Image (spheres, rainbow, N blue to C red):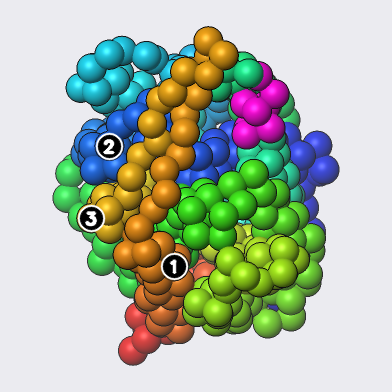
């Protein structure tokens, strides 16, 4: 294992960096748990049309995310390549998140759809401008294998604590107000502030590595966007990342419907999500210690298998089960998903090191842009699939009624066909995605020992020192499985 003492980061740097993912972790949870539900049950947009919002926004991400990665890599300021975008994020994150949750009451569904689409694209663009430089920064703060795990563990504690708040509090805030639309406006303001202000801490607490900021080479499309996919390590990590995170998106997006219509306890959906996320938080230190013993790859695989078996087990859950059963299930899911989340985010910063072996360039921003776009695309595809199955299964949306002069959304009884589809979808789609993630993890070959050898060789090459070219070829052979 690496013992590079000069790579140790101060707690101020770790905490400042970790605070940035209050937005990344929390916003995705609110969107994953509540946004599809908000569109269908508050704005009264059809599930099929709501799914289109996610898909169209991802078509824009296909352009904006990779471009932002290139811009971030080529930015040169006295504050570095990444940090200036955190200051811009303070304003952009606040405005875009508030707009996305503003409950417009246009009479025509088409007008509500257009507003939501514009708002979501604005939010997605703001996310891109801030989070792609943020993700890229992780590789630059330290090159040490285990220190990256420690850094990501701190980041994941911030992220999951934010996720916990975002799973439990939004509905509680909304329920506090007699008018549901007012509740969503207040909720949007509170969380917009929570997400935007921590980027000030990230800006002031972090420092970029000067040796990674060489003058950029002329832009080349093939070298920028095609070559990364020729690196086997990147492809394996990409599949591990996409399919495990898409599993989380699907579980979150179905949870509200599952608790509301199948279990019949809509008021507890946020608390069940909270139980899952609390377990994730407490699992992080344990997985970090396990990783130091057996490596990130094996730890990720163990967590994925645990989660896979748990999702298949959800087929045994029925509305007649005692109340505690659904909470136990959520905690067991949290044990598996917590390990996957902390391990995959610890693995991601290692990918630019492997790329440097092949390209002799530091391209964290490009990898961040590609990963972020494909992550959003997989999330949108997963939620689109869920929304279409919900629509095709005969979902009946709520009806607006007037009670004591206030508009109330009255939920409708669902058909047995819809409830069966919901139960099967909740178990089997995540299980299929996790199988793909596990296979990809088996093919991933960057062990702690290989990374130490890689890091030593790259350090010598950056300094212009002599190094064994046979070592370079041997590392490529190992990473490619030859």
Can you identify the residue that label 3 sits on? Answer: 392
How far across and down, in percent of the image, does residue 229 sit? 27, 62
Query: Gap in Å between the C-alphas at discs 2 and 3?
Result: 11 Å
Q: Do residues under tags 3 and 1 come within 8 Å of each other at their CB atoms?
A: no
Q: Which residues are magenta?
A: 170-177
Which quadrant of the figure has residue 119? top left
Query: Does residue 91 show up?
Result: no
Along the viewing direction, whichever of 264 and 1 lies nearer the viewer: 264
Q: Which residue is mark 2?
A: 46
Residue denoted by label 1: 423
For residue 409, above or below residue 265 = above
Counting residues from the start of the chain, the first of labels 3 and 1 encountered is 3
Give the residue at x 82% y 43%. Answer: 11
Please identify the quadrant where the N terminus is shown: bottom right
Residue 239 location in percent, x, y?
Answer: 37, 67
Report, in whole angstroms, how far the alpha carbon at label 1 lies from the one at label 2. Answer: 21 Å
Secondary structure under badge 3?
helix
């Amino acid at each position: 294992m690496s013992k590079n003492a000069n790579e140790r980061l101060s707690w101020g740097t770790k905490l400042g960096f970790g605070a940035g993912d209050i937005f990344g972790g929390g916003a995705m949870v609110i969107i994953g748990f509540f946004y599809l539900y908000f569109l269908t049950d508050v704005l009264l947009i059809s599930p099929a049309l709501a799914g289109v919002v996610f898909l169209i926004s991802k078509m824009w991400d296909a352009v904006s995310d990779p471009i932002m990665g290139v811009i971030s890599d080529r930015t040169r300021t006295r504050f570095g390549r990444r940090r200036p975008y955190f200051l811009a994020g303070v304003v952009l994150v606040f405005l875009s998140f508030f707009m996305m949750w503003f409950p417009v009451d246009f009479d025509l569904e088409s007008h509500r759809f257009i507003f939501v689409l514009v708002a979501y694209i604005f939010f997605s663009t703001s996310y891109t401008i801030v989070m792609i430089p943020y993700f890229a920064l992780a590789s630059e703060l330290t090159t040490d294998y285990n220190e990256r795990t420690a850094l990501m563990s701190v980041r994941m504690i911030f992220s999951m604590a934010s996720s916990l708040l975002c799973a439990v509090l939004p509905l509680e805030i909304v329920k506090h107000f007699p008018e549901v639309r007012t509740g969503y406006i207040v909720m949007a303001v509170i969380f917009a502030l929570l997400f935007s202000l921590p980027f000030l801490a990230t800006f002031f607490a972090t420092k970029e590595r000067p040796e990674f900021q060489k003058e950029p080479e002329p832009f080349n499309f093939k070298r920028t966007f095609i070559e990364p996919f020729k690196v086997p390590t990147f492809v394996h990590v990409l599949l591990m990342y996409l399919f495990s995170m898409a599993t989380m998106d699907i579980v979150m997006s179905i949870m509200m419907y599952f608790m509301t219509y199948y279990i019949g306890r809509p008021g507890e959906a946020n608390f069940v999500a909270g139980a899952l996320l609390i377990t994730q938080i407490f699992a992080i230190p344990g997985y970090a210690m396990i990783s130091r013993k057996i490596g990130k790859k094996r730890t990720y695989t163990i967590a994925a298998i645990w989660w896979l078996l748990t999702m298949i087990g959800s087929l045994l859950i029925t509305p007649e089960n005692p109340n505690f059963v659904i909470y136990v299930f959520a905690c067991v899911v949290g044990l598996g998903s917590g390990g996957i989340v902390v391990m995959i985010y610890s693995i991601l910063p290692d990918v630019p090191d492997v790329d440097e072996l092949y390209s002799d360039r530091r391209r964290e921003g490009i990898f961040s842009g590609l990963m972020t776009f494909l992550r959003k695309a997989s999330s949108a595809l997963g939620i689109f699939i869920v929304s279409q199955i919900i629509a095709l299964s005969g979902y009946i949306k709520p009806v607006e009624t007037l009670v004591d002069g206030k508009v109330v959304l009255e939920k409708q009884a669902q058909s047995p066909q819809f409830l069966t589809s919901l139960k099967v979808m909740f178990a089997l789609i995540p299980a299929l995605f996790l199988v793909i993630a596990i296979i990809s993890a088996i093919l991933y070959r960057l062990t702690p020992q290989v990374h130490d050898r890689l890091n030593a060789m790259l350090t010598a090459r950056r300094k212009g020192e002599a190094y064994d070219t046979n070592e370079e070829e041997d590392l490529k052979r190992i990473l490619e499985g030859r």
